[in-house]
Structures are given as C-alpha cells and as structure tokens.
Image (tube, rainbow, N blue to C red):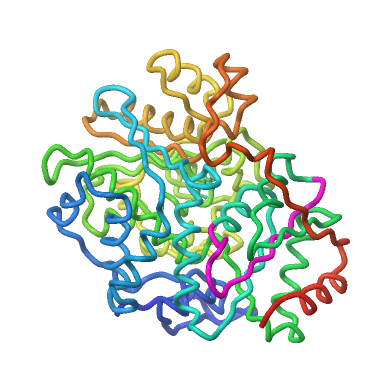
C-alpha cells in the first residue's frame, strides 16, 4: 500500500517547526489536506504502467484512463467497483485533442462544468472525499475564493453524498459572471457573499477551522495542495499519449502553462510512472521565479506577485514547488526558503521553462489564430509559446502536446480585441444568465459567521 509523507520531514526541529516524520494513508492525506508540519503529502512510491497498458487506452473513454491511473495508486485503498463508478461519475465530458499543424496538438481541458482544467481534479477529489470519509460521517467543506477555484470546487461537490459546501467570496471583488456562477450552484453548495475583501473571507475560514466550538462540524478544505487534486491531473497526459503515439515507446514533448505547478506535477508523475515524456515544458507568465531558478540555481520568490493576463498563474512562489524539489532531492518551505538544494542537473534534463510576457502572450494568441485558425486564451497561449521556445532552441520534434487550461469564452474581451471574433460559448456556460440563485449575505465579522455555521450546518 502506498503511504504519504511530508515534504518537511527533513527540516531541523527548531524555530517552532516540528517536522512530521510519519506516514499516512491516502484517506488521511486526502481528508487532512496538508501535513501537520505544513508540508505537502507525497506518495512514498510511484507505481509503474507498461507501454502496452498505456496503449490499450487508445480509442477508449477518458474515464478508462482515469481508472487505470487511479487504480495503480489506490488499488489497495478502494475496490474496483467503487473506483469505476467514481471515475465514470467524474468525467461525463470529453477531452478534445486539436491538431494545430503536423503532429503538434492542443489538448483542451475546458469541457467541464466551469470550463477550466481545475474541474478535472476537483470532481475526482470530491468523490474520493465522499467515499473515504466513512459512511456515517458528514463533512463540511469551507472555501474562500476570489473567483474561479470556488466555482470549480462548488460544481465538483454539487450533489455529492454526505458533504456540504460553503463558499465565501468578496462581494465587490468578483465579476458579474463569476458571481452568477457561484450563486447558482445550489443543492448542497451555499454561496456566502461577504461584505469585505478576499483576505477577510480567507481569515474567516481559517478561524472557523481552528475554532474548538465548531470542531463537531468536521470541516475540511479542498485547497489545491491536497494530493487528491494532484492524482487526477496525471491522467490526461497518459490519455493524450495513448491517442496520439504512433508506436509504443515514441517520445512526446508536453507543455503546461504553470502557476502553482500542480498541473505540471501531474506530468512529472506520469513520466515517472513510465510515460515516454522527452521534455516537460513549464512556461510561466511574468512571475518568472522558476525559469530564473533553472538558469541560475538561485531561488528567489517574486513578491508581491505580478498581475498578468493569464491571471490564474499570477503566483510568485508556487505551492507545489515543494513537491518538485522533494522529487529531485531538495527541500523548500512554504515561505520559499531553500533548506536543501535539489539535483539541478537532473531537473534541467527533464524540465524546460521560460517566462512569457503579456506582450508575447497577446502576440501568440494572434499569430496562432492567423497561421492555423486555432483559438487560444491567455493561459493556453503561454503554454504554446513555451513549446515554441523549446523548438526554437533545440529543433523540431515530432509529437508535441500543449495544454489549453481554460475556455477562450472566459476571456471574451481579450479574444475579441485581438482576433476580431466573439468566442463561441461552451455548453456549460450557456444559460448562465437565466439561472437564478441568491447568496447568503454576511458582514465581514467572524462572530456572525460562526453563529451562522453553528445554526445552519448539519452534523
Ligand atoms: C490554475 C490555473 C492554471 C495554473 O495551474 P497550476 O496547477 O496552478 O500550475 C493555469 N491555467 C488556468 C486557466 C488555471 O485556472
């Protein structure tokens, strides 16, 4: 059985840090989210897949790939029948692989209910939580959001048995469309509109987590560092390869537009499971701490982070960097302090990274549309530009896949300004304006929030 350890286990026990040196099961890693020493949970073994197992997925449904990968990790934690129903329920939508030219592809991860790749991870994690919490226990998920993550998490948990969700958002800091998405999820998902800022929402959530008077409510967080959100992100790399490879063993280059590095980490694990990935490109926007690190060997977080067009990647110290460092033998903590250096040469062999400016992002959106008719939004454009940068430096390579992580219709103004077209609205975003739902309105006041939770939530 695979167990999970903390990325902080090797720190010196000083300065208030008490490194967690134990290991936990998948269920515990999932329900706790973070290790007790604030490190991130890591699997103590990575299961292998053979090329013929991978190629057997050719022409199969996406959920078959999800089953193969998840079963390799969790075969001893969950029975096949339950796992099968979790993956089928998680992925009732497709994963288009769109040819740009030759054998260069865009993988569109934007067909889920909130039109970003975060749906992939959030949906499977929600169902894992429902399964692993135990039959008689209820869970309450609390999340603070400044926009997209909240709706992905809310939609993912909608209708999931035994779990209720409260999403707090800052009343005046979300767009009209985002507010509509959050307010109209319904069922077991409550939207709470707070008269305050994102930080106020986050503080109210944090206080509730540590309030002994609310401990009976079994709170859990669904944040992006949960290993339960990494595991589902291994799947689409395996799926893409199975559909596109000409013969077993052929190598592939993958480009992943990166912010907190959770998505790219999925590809790093896929490679270690046996997927023939020649190079993992991890382009960032102008938050360039990682490409600078790869070049110089000196890590320096960008603080405060820079506001770029690809706004979901405005991260100055990626939370999953701790996992990348750990995989390569190093340790970096939550604040960005490096305690042990990873094997930089090995990293450079496997990972390529460049920083893509907003100007280059805009140029890429326009050039790719003019040349190939492919519509990209800003995140996907950073991904594609990262792939081009690799090809510029090292020469052409037959099979390449670049990820599109959000639907262009989420960025209508940019697309219309650059391309002179109105992006087509995906199925999931249609009818949003006709949907109705009212949020709970609360002041930015912890005591009011606590009384609301205590009086409304089921145990
Ligand atoms: C979150 C997000 C990213 C960044 O993914 P990480 O896993 O944080 O690197 C990229 N694009 C979009 C659209 C996102 O929502």
Location of the C terminus (image quadrant): bottom right
User: For this rendering, which residue is in front, 71 or 23?
Assistant: 71
User: For this rendering, which residue is in front, 287 or 314?
Assistant: 314
Q: Which residues are magenta?
A: 156-172
Question: Where is residue 416 shown, x and y percent of the image?
Answer: 60, 19
Q: Please, is residue 390 above or below residue 312 in the view?
A: above
Give the quarter of the image for residue 15.
bottom right
Question: Where is residue 271 shown, x and y percent of the image?
Answer: 27, 53
User: For this rendering, which residue is in front, 390 or 153?
Assistant: 153
* Magenta residue check for 407: no
Count of labels shown? 0
Q: Residue at x 58, y 23 (%)?
A: 415
Q: Residue at x 46, y 42 (%)?
A: 111
Question: Where is residue 267 shown, x and y percent of the image?
Answer: 35, 51
* Magenta residue check for 164: yes
Q: Residue at x 30, y 76 (%)?
A: 79
Q: Please, is residue 155 above or below residue 94 in the view?
A: below
Location of the N terminus (image quadrant): bottom left
Q: Is residue 373 left or right of residue 20?
A: left
Question: Where is residue 301 shown, x and y percent of the image?
Answer: 59, 50
Q: Residue at x 53, y 52 (%)?
A: 260
Q: Is residue 2 left or right of residue 37?
A: left
Q: Is residue 326 left or right of residue 288?
A: left
């Amino acid at each position: 059985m695979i167990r999970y350890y903390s990325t902080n286990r090797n720190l010196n026990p000083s300065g208030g840090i008490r490194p967690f040196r134990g290991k936990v099961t998948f269920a515990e890693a999932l329900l706790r989210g973070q290790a007790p020493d604030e490190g991130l949970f890591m699997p103590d073994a990575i299961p292998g897949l053979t090329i013929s197992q991978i190629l057997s997925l050719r022409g199969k449904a996406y959920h078959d790939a999800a089953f193969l990968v998840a079963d390799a990790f969790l075969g001893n934690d969950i029975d096949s029948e339950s796992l099968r129903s979790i993956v089928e329920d998680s992925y009732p939508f497709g994963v288009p692989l769109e040819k740009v030219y030759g054998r260069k592809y865009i993988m569109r991860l934007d067909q889920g209910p909130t039109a970003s790749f975060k749906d992939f991870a959030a949906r499977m994690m929600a169902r894992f939580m429902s399964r692993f919490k135990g039959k008689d226990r209820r869970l309450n998920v609390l999340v603070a959001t400044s926009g997209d993550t909240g709706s992905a998490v809310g939609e993912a948990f909608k209708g999931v048995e035994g779990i209720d969700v409260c999403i707090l958002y800052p009343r005046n800091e979300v767009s009209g469309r985002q507010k509509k998405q959050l307010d109209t999820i319904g069922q077991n998902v409550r939207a709470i509109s707070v008269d305050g800022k994102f930080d106020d929402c986050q503080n109210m959530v944090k206080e509730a987590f540590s309030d002994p008077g609310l401990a009976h409510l079994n709170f859990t967080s669904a944040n992006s560092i949960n290993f339960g959100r990494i595991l589902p992100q291994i799947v689409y790399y395996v799926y893409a390869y199975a559909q596109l490879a000409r013969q077993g063993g052929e190598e592939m280059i993958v480009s992943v537009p990166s912010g907190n590095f959770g998505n790219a980490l999925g590809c790093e694990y896929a490679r270690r499971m046996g997927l023939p990935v020649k190079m993992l490109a991890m382009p960032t926007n102008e938050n360039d701490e990682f490409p600078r690190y790869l070049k110089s060997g000196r890590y320096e977080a960008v603080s405060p982070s820079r506001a770029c067009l690809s706004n979901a990647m405005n991260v100055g110290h990626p939370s999953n960097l701790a996992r990348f460092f750990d995989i390569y033998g190093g340790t970096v903590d939550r604040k960005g302090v490096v305690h042990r250096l990873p094997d930089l040469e090995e990293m450079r062999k496997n990972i390529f990274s460049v920083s893509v400016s907003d100007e280059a992002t805009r140029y890429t959106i326009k050039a790719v549309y003019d040349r190939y008719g492919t519509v990209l939004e800003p995140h996907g454009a950073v991904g594609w530009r990262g792939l081009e940068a690799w090809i510029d430096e090292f020469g052409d390579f037959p099979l390449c896949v670049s990820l599109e992580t959000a639907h262009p219709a989420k960025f209508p103004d940019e697309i219309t300004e650059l391309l002179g077209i109105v992006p087509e609205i995906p199925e999931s975003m249609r009818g949003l304006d006709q949907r109705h739902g009212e949020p709970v309105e609360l002041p930015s006041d912890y005591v009011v929030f606590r009384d609301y939770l205590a009086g409304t939530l089921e145990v």
